[in-house]
């Protein structure tokens, strides 16, 4: 095994991001990587069980086998991570495609090179005592939404699919840390939660809930993906192909050996609870392989659907084409089967 290494450089990168005049500005000089075989990989959030495959690729030596020196850094949200890539401070990262696509449409030099989560983990969650039998039952009720989240632009789509408008629901902006306690204490009737975070917190507190996944209720967007700056892709195509290939090997290893993959994650990030990380990981395989034949690849029709949905809420120009956002050129010939 390679020695573990937890990084802390994202704070400085985020601080310097404030100096940028636009999220899509910045130089085209290849970001933080000092050589073609070195990749500084920024996650979408703080390390958690749903990142285990990347840790396995590092600790089990899949990156090393491809001649890569990869450093995995924790993130502070998909929006921040994708802006770091857009600004040239990071070359390769992990972010929700729904946050990345509007940046690309506005001119950010970013391409999605592999899509890991084929659907969003987001969901509407209510305690069973609320008797929420469908999203349409939100009419006249209060819905807690995490302030500043990428979920908010999806709310009109979610409600429209249920025959509702924003005027039919009392939307309550809350800090992410307040969503679960606000629901349990009855301050809101439901929340915009997620299977891999808020849902786990509620279950661990013994709450019984009714949950309605976005993907089952009109919001079928591709989700967390490996993204890269276009200039880095142009200069180092084989490096990126090797990185994607090794990452997929790490995820395949973790799917076959989940306890080992989670242990690798904790080796890289020792402050994590292995038990908690395992619970988080267990929500991941279904999201990665929902209605898809292969790991790491969203099909063209999924990109078409995501583009149309984001256009419907004015996050994308009507002239945007699905192929503006992704490339299959960096995927290995033999993708792992779902």
Image (tube, grey):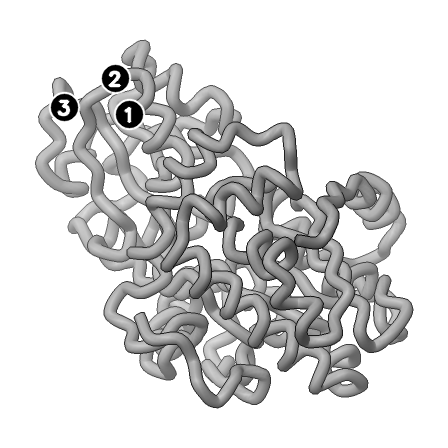
The residue pinned by badge 3 equals 128
**Label 2 with label 3: CB-CB less than 8 Å:** no
Secondary structure found at label 1: helix
- Image quadrant assignment for residue 6: top right
Relative side of 158 to 152, left or right: left
| Residue drawn at x 36%, y 66% as measured from the top left | 309
Residue linked to disc 2 = 206
7 sits to left or right of 54: right
Q: Give the alpha-carbon distance from disc 2 to disc 3, as whole Å.
A: 12 Å
Find out whether the residues at labels 3 and 1 contact each other: C-beta distance under 8 Å.
no
Image position of 198 with respect to 106: above or below: above
Q: Name which residue lies at 63% across and 81% down.
A: 241
Q: Is residue 24 visible?
A: no
Q: Residue furthest top?
A: 185
Residue at numbered disc 1:
203
How many residues crowd mark 3 within 10 Å: few (<14), some (14–19), many (20+)? few
Q: Which comes before the other along the chain, label 3 or label 1?
A: 3
Q: CA distance from mark 3 to mark 1?
A: 12 Å
Residue under the image location 53 percent in, 79 percent down: 326
Residue 56 seen from this side: yes
Quadrant of the snapshot with the C terminus:
bottom left
Residue 141 point in image, percent of width and height: 23, 27
Q: Residue at x 67, y 72 (%)?
A: 65
């Amino acid at each position: 095994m390679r020695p573990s290494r937890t990084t802390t450089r994202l704070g400085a990168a985020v601080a310097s991001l404030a100096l940028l005049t636009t999220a899509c500005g910045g130089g085209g000089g290849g970001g933080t990587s000092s050589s073609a075989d070195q990749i500084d990989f920024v996650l979408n959030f703080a390390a958690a069980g749903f990142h285990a495959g990347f840790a396995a690729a590092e600790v089990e030596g899949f990156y090393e086998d491809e001649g890569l020196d990869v450093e995995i850094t924790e993130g502070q949200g998909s929006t921040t991570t994708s802006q770091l890539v857009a600004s040239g401070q990071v070359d390769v990262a992990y972010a929700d495609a729904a946050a990345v696509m509007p940046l690309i449409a506005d001119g950010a030099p970013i391409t999605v090179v592999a899509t890991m989560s084929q659907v969003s983990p987001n969901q509407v969650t209510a305690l069973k005592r609320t008797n929420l039998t469908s999203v349409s039952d939100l009419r006249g009720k209060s819905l807690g939404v995490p302030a500043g989240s990428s979920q908010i632009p999806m709310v009109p789509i979610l409600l429209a699919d249920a025959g509702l408008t924003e005027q039919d629901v009392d939307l309550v902006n809350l800090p992410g840390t307040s969503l679960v306690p606000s629901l349990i204490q009855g301050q809101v009737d439901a929340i915009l939660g997620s299977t891999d975070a808020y849902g786990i917190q509620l279950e661990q507190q013994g709450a019984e809930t009714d949950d309605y996944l976005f993907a089952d209720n009109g919001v079928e967007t591709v989700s967390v993906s490996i993204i890269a700056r276009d200039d880095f892709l142009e200069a180092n195509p084989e490096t990126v192909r090797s990185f994607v290939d090794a990452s997929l090997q790490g995820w395949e290893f973790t799917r076959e050996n989940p306890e080992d993959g989670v242990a690798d994650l904790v080796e890289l990030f020792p402050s994590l609870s292995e038990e908690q990380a395992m619970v988080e990981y267990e929500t991941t395989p279904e999201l990665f392989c929902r209605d898809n034949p292969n790991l790491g690849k969203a099909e063209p029709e999924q990109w078409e659907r995501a583009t149309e949905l984001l256009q419907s809420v004015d996050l994308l120009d009507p002239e945007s084409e699905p192929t503006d956002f992704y490339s299959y050129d960096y995927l290995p010939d033999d993708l792992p089967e779902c």
